Amino acid sequence: MNEAVKNSIAQIALMFPFSMLRGNRRYPPFLPFYHVVGNEKLPYINSYRVRTAAEFEKELDYFLRFFEPVSLKNILEKHDNRKMHLSFDDGLVECYSIIAPILKRKGIPATFFVSPGFVDNKKMFHRFKRSILENEGVLDKGGKKYFFYEEGELDQLAAKHGIDFAQYKPYMNMEQLHSLHSDGFLIGGHSMAHPEMWKLNEEEQFSQVENTMQWVEEHFHPGVKAFAFPFTDDGLPQSLFARLKKSGIVDATFGTAGLKPDSESINYQRVPVELRNWRVQKTLHFEYFYYFVRSLTGKNEVKH
Ligand SMILES: [Zn+2]
């Protein structure tokens, strides 16, 4: 379904009160996720609009009208339609400086999915490098994608134009992560350095999860071993999930396809709040109404 049709579905959905849309049907766990909240434009983020702290708080308040925020363990063990669990991907420093203080004040549990390769600003996500080069006018916006194995080309372009990626410090350091952990937030894995997983073979895909979760386990020993696939879990084979399940290295994995059930018992889909430039009411109403519309055609489940 294309974006124009989705927009029409969202407009219809907005005509109903949310409690009526949700009704008494059984839905998958409601798992909205974000990346970052900030009051300034971030030069390394072009792919979504960054919410201000005030906007973010308003969105949380809207969620809290209809959902009880619970821990990941709680929602996975005993799910009902009125629970939600929030998560944040990529381990950006605003998770520590802006997001966590707001969540603590409101008593909202959350999971932070981080890539060990980026912690302490050791390395930068190749898409961030591309955004910086776009904003510096070196690359055209909406041009070549640049996959993880083409990162060298981005480094060369930066060097040629005198741009130093190391001056940007987008990520949390180890101390900040430990602080989140001791405040009761869950730390999960998000791959070693955010590769396009569908460009890897199955052995490499497995290693990404394994190496990341070993690092998470070693440093945080979390109560739930959670891994969020970078970008998307679309196209990841059933055999990978079977192997992950058997290995015991993860308790649950996460995709980004919206409110949808998944064919894999350990895999859960999250709702990307920042994906469209919609206000959160529209996203929430859309997800539940879209679920209903798709359930009529029997096409709800994400299959691997
Ligand atoms: Zn990510």
Image: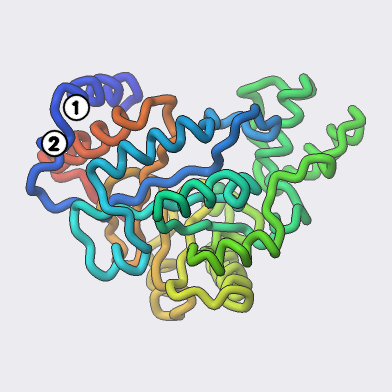
Quadrant where the N terminus sits is top left
Residue 122 lies, with reference to residue 271, above or below; the image says below
Residue 163 in view in this figure: yes
- Residue 29 placement (x, y as % from top left): 27, 55
What is the CA distance from the residue labelled 1 to the residue labelled 2?
8 Å
Residue 21 image label:
2
Q: Residue at x 62, y 47 (%)?
A: 97
Image spot of residue 243 (x, y percent): 43, 74
Residue 241 is situated, as x and y percent measured from the top left of the image, at 40, 67
Res 273 quadrant in image? top left
Query: What's the colour scheme?
Result: rainbow
Q: Nearer the viewer, residue 72 or 195?
A: 72
Q: Quadrant of residue 209?
A: bottom right
Indicate if the residue with disc 2 has its beta carbon within 8 Å of ligand 1.
no
Q: Is residue 165 left or right of residue 52?
A: right
Q: Residues within 10 Å of mark 1 (few under 14, many from 20)?
A: many
Q: Quadrant of residue 180?
A: bottom right
Q: Which residue is mark 1?
A: 13
Relative vertical location of residue 49 with respect to residue 77 in this rendering, above or below: above
For this orientation, the residue located farthest to the left is: 24
Examine the rendered structure and indicate whether residue 4 appears above or below residue 44: above
| Residue 188 vs residue 5, the one in the foreground | 188
Kind of residue at badge 1: Ala
Quarter of the image with the C terminus is bottom left
The structure residue drawn at horizontal position 25% and vertical position 53%, both measured from the top left corner, is 261
Dot 2 alpha-carbon crowd within 10 angstroms: few under 14, some 14 to 19, many 20 or more: some
| Label 1 vs 2, first from the N-terminus | 1
| Ligand 1 within 8 angstroms of badge 1 C-beta | no
